[in-house]
Amino acid sequence: MSQRWKNRPPGSNWGEFGPDDQLGRLNYLTEENTVKAAQEIKTGKRFCLSLPLNVPATDATNTRRKPPILKPVVRDGQTAFNLRIDNFIPGSTQVVSDDAVLLYNQHSSQWDSFGHMGGLFDADDDGVDEIIQYNGHKLVNEAGEPRYGDLGAWNLGIEHMAQHCVQGRGLLLNMKKHYGEESHPVSYDDVMRMLEADGIEIERGDIVCCYTGYADKLIELGSDVPPDLPRTHCPAFDGFDQKLLQWIDDSGMSVLVSDNRAVEYEHGGLPEGMERGAALPIHEHCLFKLGIHLGEMWYFTEIAEWLAANNRYRFFLPAPPLFLPGAVGSPANPVGTV
């Protein structure tokens, strides 16, 4: 297909993986890369890197996203929980349970697809900003319609990530060890100091995982999580640091993950003097410009302790999202194996 755009955003890589690309830096997760990642399995010990999907316990830090609600499946007017099948098939000795769930895809441990956050940008060079996403794609079809009535992405949905079968080498950056639980916008210089102190080398295709301690606070506080937790506790990348954004690009990472709500420090608005721009610049830089998927609110506590005790920072990481066509995010159930 011909190129969808005449202008691409400054600092973006649109077109570098082809005009139709919807994988972005997942193209770095090749078969050879997965084989190399599997070599990190030395003991076979496995760690669940997902929070329980009912954590956070409330919607305090994001009122648009709610904890999951289990709902009954009803059979002939009866709730299918410990339901005797001989009610329907005489003589049957079986009992059945079945359920449904109302699930907000990005309430707990999650993946962001490129459809999660786009931008206003004059990609067609007509002098007018338009709603546009990674690589010049749009979520709607040519008629301007979503996939399923009033929502659903025709392009850049989470299904592309699911079909690529995300498996690679995880690399843990232990911010909590260096900065504790205090709120701290982590700069490029901070990152360089951490990498040097811990002897970490990032290679092309690595999945960079940031342990900040935020998920620990969600578990500790339970239903008492304060609304301002993202800005009052734990270190996080400072997206307004231009050198840090350039490092994300130059590092060759395929994916960026954190145990906090947004990967980046939430300043709550634009910096003084900036009249127009992205309030979440790492989201813009990764999802919109570079095609780097973001994982949020993962759970790294146990694997971080094990890696530190064994003087390691790499592990094997399979982490596919749900194969849900048209969704712009998905729960994640990643597993770290060492």
Image (tube, rainbow, N blue to C red):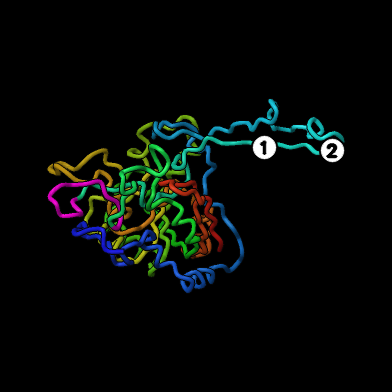
Q: Which mark is residue 93?
A: 2
Q: Whole-percent x and y of residue 85?
A: 78, 35
Foreground: 117 or 227?
117
**SS assignment at label 2:** loop
Q: Inspect the image, locate mark 1, and give the three-letter code of the amino acid beneath it.
A: Asp
Residue tagged 1: 98
In the picture, measured across the screen, residue 329 lies left or right of residue 11, that is right
Q: Inspect the image, locate mark 2, and give the three-letter code of the amino acid beneath it.
A: Thr
Residue sitting at x 39%, y 31%: 63
Above or below, comparing residue 150 to residue 121 in the picture: above
Residue sitting at x 20%, y 41%: 270
**SS assignment at label 1:** loop
Is label 2 in contact with label 1 (beta carbons under 8 Å)? Answer: no
Which quadrant of the view contains residue 150? Answer: top left
Q: Which mark sits nearer the N-terminus, 2 or 1?
A: 2
The residue segment tinted magenta is: 122-135
Foreground: 154 or 285?
154
